[in-house]
Image (cartoon, coloured by chain):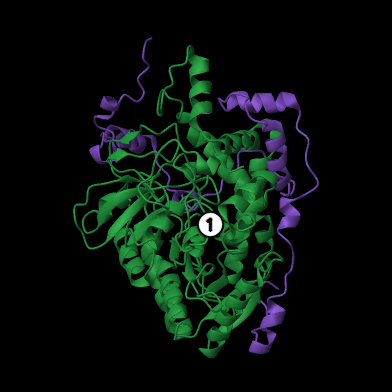
Amino acid sequence: MPIGKPITKSQITNLLKPTWSVNSILNSTKIPEISQKTVDKMIFISGLDDDLQFKQSLEKQLSVVNELDKGKGDNNSLFRLLKSDFHPVKMNLQQIQEDIRNLRPREDKGEVGFGKHDYYVVRSK
Amino acid sequence: MLKRVLSRSYTTIDRWNSIITTIESTGGKYKYVAKDNILHKGLTTCASEILSNFESPYDATVIELLNKDMDLIGKANLDQFGMGSATANTIYGTVINPLFEDDDYITGGSSGGSAAAVAANLCDFSLGTDTGGSVRSPASNCGLYGYKPSYGRISRWGVIPYAQSLDTVGIITREMNVMKEVFTILDQYDDKDPTSMPQDIRDKVAKAVEVRNRERNGKYVFGIPEEIIVEELTDEVKYKLSLVIEKLLDLGHTVVPVSVPSIKKSISTYYAIATSEASSNFSRLDGIRYGKDHNFEGGDETIRGNRSKGFGEVVRKRIVLGNYSISADSGDFYSRAVEVRQQISKEFNEIFYLPHQMTNPDGLFEDPSKVDFLVTPATINKPLKISDYIKMEENSMDELTNDILSLPMSLGGLPAVSVPIKDKGLDISTQGIQISGQYGDDYSVLDMGDKIIKEMNM
């Protein structure tokens, strides 16, 4: 049962008895092994230099993430608290085209005069 | 060992390393600082080398709303991009907790600068961001109120994203009345933010809360999740929690044990989701599109060089984990995490009396034995000395222990506030109690936090 019976003052101590240890997850001895080839690939796609002990750190972090049960899907699932995800409104092509036509750069969104800050400018040497 | 603490590349203006940029005062009812991952027209660094010269061309919506009546006086130190538990991963030096005088203690993170500035009386309130506890934890460690809103309740427009499906803007104060005043200003739908809670959902929540409050007639049901009662909780925080439970019973409320089994998987779930989203968000930071260019030769070297020089160690490690989680090499890590997140949300909906107005807007008030609020500690233990924290961080993953108390609410998108309750025999609070509620029930959560504190201090 997700909801228990109402407690009285005399039951508070019992209620606060520990049920498990977080450190059992954080200090798991089941350290997964990742091949150096995979680690090198991840460093490469992350756009980083190989100047840290990434293999050791990735395995350490994965020992925590690895607690997740085997899933059913691929890596394309999403869960967001967005109205459009739970109550989607259908749009036809005409409505989409009209929305695009009505798009205007907004100054309050930083979409006007952005170039003067030099971002997105590739400099020649 | 203390190299990271003692050496810093940039300076702060106060001895707690809380404020990293000052902004000329323009007057206003209350002085405030904003965490330096919230844009204002000017320097916004995320406490990172890569954005150390970044000037935003616009203000975040929260800054725009507040600046009509409030006085922004500076930007606050943080763990780079919000990644960290002690505000030690920053180019501005570790933030020092103003509550202690005998030694240097951590504030918690990642909004440690925002909390320290309020605790040191440098301002009346501050804005932080809370992705997985980053407002509640430092507020708890610094004896303050720290509030994380329901997901989407306060605009994220102009907040540099860490993990956009979890990021929220939170508020830190010394007084609850200031908290409520600031929240009332920020509680608005924002058409610039696609994740902003739409007005019709806000209206539905308000109506449902009215019905619930009428039915409850001032006597509510409080749940204590058994999965939160972990071995690592200190006796002191359990003592505080027991005092709060006693007080609730004295006031005629009902307290019940509840079970949300997936809470045990919240740390794993959070790290898979947050790092995956971060690795995508940070791909734009390469010194070309955004960020400091160190003038390396060649395209590939430019990107790798700028990013390796520009991101701190923690950020780089989490980017690699994120890329692994979403890659085919991991199999389906991200998907597994999303499934657990859905399950956590479902389990919360099973225990809350108020129906979830986003996922179940036609839900009925069926079972009055369900709960209105959850009461839990905000942090597991007292703040550590900075030297002890650094030692622990280097040798284990124990710095994540506190997260078990804050992450479930983040994954569920629930509102939560950490409130200060004085330590036994002392006049300060170094560990707060967290009150949380159903998605959208923010005002009730703040009101209940306020009532509990007033009753406890009588």
Q: How many marks?
A: 1
Q: Residue at x 55, y 60 (%)?
A: B409
- Is residue B362 at all visible to an observer of this figure? yes
**Of B260 and A74, which appears nearest the observer?**
B260
Is B311 left or right of B348, judged from the image as shown?
A: left
The percent coordinates of residue B420 (x first, y second) are: 48, 71
**Of B196 and A57, which appears nearest the observer?**
A57
Instruction: Answer above or below: position of A77 versus A111.
Output: below
Is B421 left or right of B387, judged from the image as shown?
A: left
For the residue labelled by badge 1, is the local secondary structure a helix, a strand or a loop?
Answer: loop
Chain identifier of the residue bearing label 1 in the image: B
Is B426 left or right of B391, judged from the image as shown?
A: left
Q: Residue at x 49, y 61 (%)?
A: B136
**Of B338 and A51, which appears nearest the observer?**
A51
- Is residue B368 at all visible to an observer of this figure? no
Q: Residue A31: name its quadrant.
A: top right
Q: Give chain A's shade.
A: purple
Q: Among all residues in the image, which is located at the extreme left? A: B26
The percent coordinates of residue A61 (x first, y second) are: 68, 42
Q: Which quarter shows the C terminus of chain B? A: bottom left
Q: Residues within 10 Å of mark 1 (few under 14, many from 20)?
A: many
- The residue identified by callout 1 is B105
Instruction: Answer above or below: position of B436 versus B399.
Output: below
Q: Give chain B's shade.
A: green
Q: Among all residues in the image, which is located at the extreme right? A: A29
The percent coordinates of residue B52 (x first, y second) are: 39, 34
Instruction: Check disc 1 and give the amino acid type.
Output: Tyr
Q: Residue at x 54, y 53 (%)?
A: B132
The percent coordinates of residue B397 (x first, y second) are: 67, 49
